[in-house]
Image: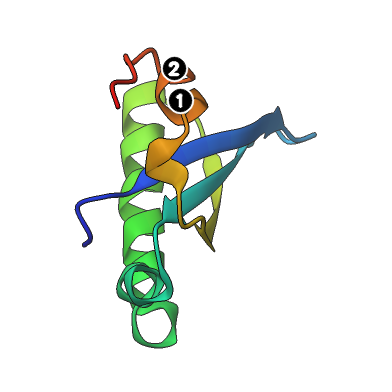
């Protein structure tokens, strides 16, 4: 996995059956990193999503669906909001 990744929770909903629907964007700096995160045929992304979903279900005791999307944003590391939104200090 690339060292420089940002995961952004875009939306969290609860469906009619009480299942937690979590939409997250995995931000990488370039296409090569995206290929690493997605993996051949999406295998790596599926593995990441399954492990994260199991962690969420075990820790929170709820059923969950995790919707992951990988996006390339070349300069995401230079944008203060990517840090401050997570309670981190931005230092350039």
Q: Quadrant of the C terminus?
A: top left
Residue behind mark 1: 80
Q: Residues within 10 Å of mark 1 (few under 14, many from 20)?
A: some
20 horizontally vs 70: left or right: right
x 40%, y 70%: residue: 34
Q: What residue is rendered at 33% in x and 58% in y?
A: 48
Furthest residue toward right: 16
In the picture as drawn, the residue positioned furthest to the bottom comes out as 41
Residue at 34% x, 20% y is 90
Q: Nearer the viewer, residue 90 or 50?
A: 90
Label 2 with label 1: CB-CB less than 8 Å: yes
Front one among 22 and 69: 69
- SS type, badge 1: loop
Using the rendered view, name the quadrant where residue 24 is placed. Answer: top right
- Residue 40 occupies quadrant: bottom left
Task: Give the x, y percent position of residue 31.
Answer: 42, 74
x and y percent of residue 61 in the render? 42, 25
The quadrant of the picture occupied by the N terminus is: bottom left
Residue 81 percent location from the top left of the image: 51, 24
Count of numbered badges drawn on the protein? 2
> Which residue bears the numbered disc 2?
84
| Residue 59 image label | none
Q: Looking at the image, can residue 29 be seen?
A: yes
Q: Residue at x 49, y 19 (%)?
A: 85
- Is residue 18 in sight in this rendering? no
Q: Disc 2 or disc 1, which is closer to the eye?
A: 1
Horizontal relation, residue 16 to residue 21: left or right: right
Q: Residues within 10 Å of mark 2 (few under 14, many from 20)?
A: few
């Amino acid at each position: 996995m690339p060292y420089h990744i940002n995961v952004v929770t875009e939306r969290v909903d609860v469906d009619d059956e009480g299942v937690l629907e979590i939409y997250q964007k995995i931000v990488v700096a370039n296409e090569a990193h995206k290929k690493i995160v997605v993996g051949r045929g999406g295998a790596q992304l599926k593995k990441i999503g399954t492990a994260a979903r199991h962690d969420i279900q075990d820790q929170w005791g709820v059923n969950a669906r995790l919707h992951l999307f990988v996006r390339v944003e070349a300069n995401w590391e230079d944008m203060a909001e990517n840090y401050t939104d997570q309670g981190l200090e931005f230092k350039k």
